[in-house]
């Protein structure tokens, strides 16, 4: 029998055994209840309203334990599941008062997953604990209480969590969660517990800085440059830090993990990101993408995720990397997903029969009738062997119908440039990990000196020439007028002694005593590369690209100057020696206000909107990379 014939036979057997008699289980009291569930996205034809969440979960968990060969762990798994779901377990399935959790695709507060490699199976449970009146803060407190319960009953270690907990206390009302817990079951050892935290819990724009500080506190002081230069090299708008997790154990192999969303990433982008880890094998990520989502040139419907693990003894380079693909967004039905996984397992010597048994035990419908039972599939190298994990959406609240898959990214409406300005005001460059670390540690004059030497190379030396070039090519006289005013100020309003470049040179002379002892000319490469990037952006054939860059540079200029002004004032330097900075602290505020006016003028030109947005984004990426490289020079 061929592989394809075997796959088809298995899928049909799953469908027959998993058929659900909807009429026998649907017991909604009246039409009003059906309409209420429909309004919030629930599918009443898939609900069992007389069953509680914990009863539903226990039923599925019992079947999964038997299916994957962990029958001996069933009662222990059920006991732990009941304990960690006690805050919401007695609520009825479909109860719309329950917190809409981001743990699973159907908003249920739990999810199962199975990890399979040629030698071992692992069953996992992920849950979100709820407060009595569920919200981010009460859920955080409930999570803390569960931590203590696990420490008392299962002897987990909270030492590392306590070192970083203050970084993740939720204050951002837009955050999706505050704390999750996971437990893993194995055939031959005791369960292991894991904690997930939200880097965006306080401010979304500080997520990268939170990750960097947490890694430093936990002893991984050289980890950030690897993340920044490889996994997050496309910048914060596209490579976004979303989870930070800890193994709740004290042994040397207990992991610290960092997760990133990769917006609109191609398989090649994901391949590049995964190369940050020591377990990276060239070609793995691209081949996995091709197998799981063969028609996708980029993952735009829902972002792929990379995860990186550090253990004791690691520092700059993570031990392992994992690729997570949101497969339910890139297949028409679960039958398609099942067939892809079956074939991949057979080709790579993975235990396909265990996977098939797991799906058969979990399914409550035919595989053709919906999409979403498989939420993610992930790939990681484990001792050179491939390890695939399937994340199983419980589908207790709703089932997504079969879908059509778009293989090309849809055309988006033109951006609102005023919104872009407010976005960059909120997502301030001052939240970059380099500037955040400068501010939280004892002031280091040598680092400030090196930063300003690179600013001279990157911005100050050529800025007036670049701005003048844009002014000479832009047709809109209103835009030209504002940019000319800014250029005139940069040139000292006609007074050679007040030219900003000359003031900057005086600042450099004033901080000469701070010169870095180990300085070499190669340490100016970040500035030189930043200058080259700005040159290509400002001199783009479309002058509106340069206008977008000018808008972003003025916003960043204000944020940067205010941040560095605080650092200078921690030293005993005379303010008269840093006239460039004190002057810019004042005029950059005016220039940043003018950025909003420029955005309004550009928005009146359809041809200019997309170009200006592109120029701003490329400038943001270049500035972020510039600071990443300075971080590596100063803290690596």
Image (tube, rainbow, N blue to C red):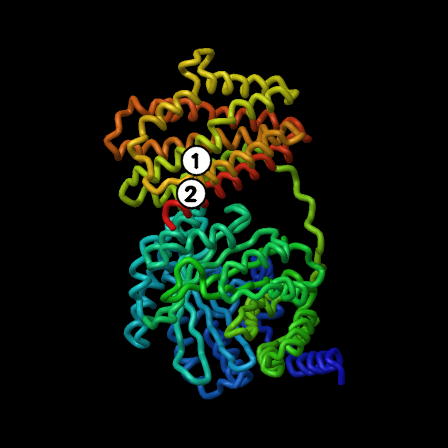
Residue wearing tag 1: 454
Disc assigned to residue 151: none
Q: Position of residue 357 (x, y in %)?
A: 60, 82
Residue wearing tag 2: 630
Q: Residue at x 37, y 74 (%)?
A: 83
Q: Residue at x 56, y 54 (%)?
A: 262
Which corner quadrant of the image does residue 521 belong to? top left
Q: Residue furthest top?
A: 494
The one nearer the camera, 1 or 537, is 537
Which corner quadrant of the image does residue 76 belong to? bottom left
Q: Position of residue 66 (x, y in %)?
A: 52, 85
Find numbered disc 2 in the image and state the secondary structure of the residue it sits on.
helix
Of pointers 1 and 2, the one earlier in the residue sequence = 1
**Residue 129 in sight:** no
Cα distance in 3D space between marks 1 and 2 = 9 Å
The one nearer the camera, 454 or 393, is 454
Q: Is residue 321 left or right of residue 158?
A: right
* Residues at discs 1 and 2 in contact (Cβ within 8 Å): yes
Q: Is residue 358 above or below residue 584?
A: below
Find numbered disc 1 in the image and state the secondary structure of the residue it sits on.
helix
The one nearer the camera, 258 or 151, is 258
Q: How busy is the neighbourhood of tag 1: few (under 14 within 10 Å), some, or many (20 plus)?
A: many
């Amino acid at each position: 029998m061929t592989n394809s014939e075997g796959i088809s036979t298995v899928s049909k057997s799953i469908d027959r055994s998993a058929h659900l008699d909807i009429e026998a289980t649907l017991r909604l009291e009246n039409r009003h209840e059906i309409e209420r569930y429909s309004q919030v996205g629930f599918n009443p034809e898939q609900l069992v309203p007389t069953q509680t969440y914990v009863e539903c979960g226990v039923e599925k968990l019992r079947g999964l334990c038997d299916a994957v060969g962990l029958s001996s762990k069933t009662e222990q798994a059920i006991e732990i599941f009941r304990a960690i779901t006690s805050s919401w377990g007695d609520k009825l399935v479909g109860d719309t008062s329950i917190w809409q959790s981001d743990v699973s695709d159907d908003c249920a507060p739990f999810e199962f997953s199975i990890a399979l490699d040629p030698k071992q199976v692992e069953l996992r449970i992920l849950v979100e604990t709820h407060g009595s009146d569920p919200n981010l803060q009460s859920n955080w407190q409930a999570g803390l209480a569960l931590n203590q319960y696990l420490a008392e009953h299962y002897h987990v270690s909270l030492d590392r969590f306590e070192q970083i907990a203050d970084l993740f206390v939720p204050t951002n009302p837009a955050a999706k969660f505050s704390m999750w817990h996971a437990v893993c079951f194995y055939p031959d050892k005791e369960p292991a517990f894991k904690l997930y935290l939200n880097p965006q819990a306080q401010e979304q724009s500080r997520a990268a800085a939170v990750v960097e500080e947490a890694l430093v506190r936990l002893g991984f002081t050289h980890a950030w440059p690897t993340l920044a230069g490889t996994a997050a090299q496309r910048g914060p708008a596209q490579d976004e830090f979303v989870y930070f997790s800890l193994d709740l154990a004290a042994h040397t192999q207990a992991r610290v993990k960092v997760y990133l969303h990769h917006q609109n990433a191609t398989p090649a982008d994901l391949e590049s990101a995964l190369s940050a880890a020591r377990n990276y094998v060239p070609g793995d990520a691209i081949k996995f993408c091709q197998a799981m989502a063969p028609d996708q040139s980029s993952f735009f419907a829902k972002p792929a995720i990379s995860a990186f693990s550090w253990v004791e003894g690691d520092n700059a380079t993570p031990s392992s990397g994992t690729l997570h693909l949101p497969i339910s967004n890139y297949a028409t039905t679960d039958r398609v997903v099942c067939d892809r996984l079956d074939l991949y397992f057979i080709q790579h010597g993975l235990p396909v029969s265990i996977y098939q048994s797991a799906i058969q035990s979990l399914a409550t419908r035919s595989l053709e009738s919906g999409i979403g039972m498989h939420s993610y599939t992930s790939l990681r190298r484990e001792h050179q062997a491939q390890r695939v994990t399937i994340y199983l959406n419980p589908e207790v609240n709703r089932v997504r119908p079969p879908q059509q898959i778009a293989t090309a990214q849809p055309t988006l409406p033109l951006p609102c440039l005023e919104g872009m300005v407010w976005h960059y005001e909120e997502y301030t460059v001052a939240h970059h990990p380099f500037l955040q670390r400068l501010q939280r540690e004892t002031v280091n004059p040598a680092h400030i000196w090196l930063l300003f030497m690179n600013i001279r190379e990157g911005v100050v030396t050529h800025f007036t020439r670049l701005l003048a070039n844009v002014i000479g090519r832009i047709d809109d006289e209103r835009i030209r007028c504002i940019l000319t005013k800014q250029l005139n100020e940069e040139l000292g309003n006609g007074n050679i002694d007040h030219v900003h470049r000359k003031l900057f040179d005086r600042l450099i002379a004033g901080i000469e005593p701070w010169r870095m002892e180990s300085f070499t000319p190669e340490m100016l490469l970040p500035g030189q590369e930043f200058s080259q990037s700005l040159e290509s952006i400002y001199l783009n054939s479309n002058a509106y690209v340069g206008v977008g860059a000018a808008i972003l540079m003025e916003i960043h200029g204000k944020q940067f100057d205010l941040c560095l002004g605080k650092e200078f004032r921690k030293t005993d330097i005379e303010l008269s020696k840093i006239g460039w900075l004190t002057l810019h602290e004042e005029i950059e505020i005016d220039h940043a206000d003018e950025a909003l006016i420029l955005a309004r003028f550009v928005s009146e030109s359809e041809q200019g909107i997309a170009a200006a947005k592109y120029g701003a984004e490329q400038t943001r990426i270049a500035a972020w990379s510039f600071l990443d490289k300075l971080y590596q020079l100063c803290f690596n």
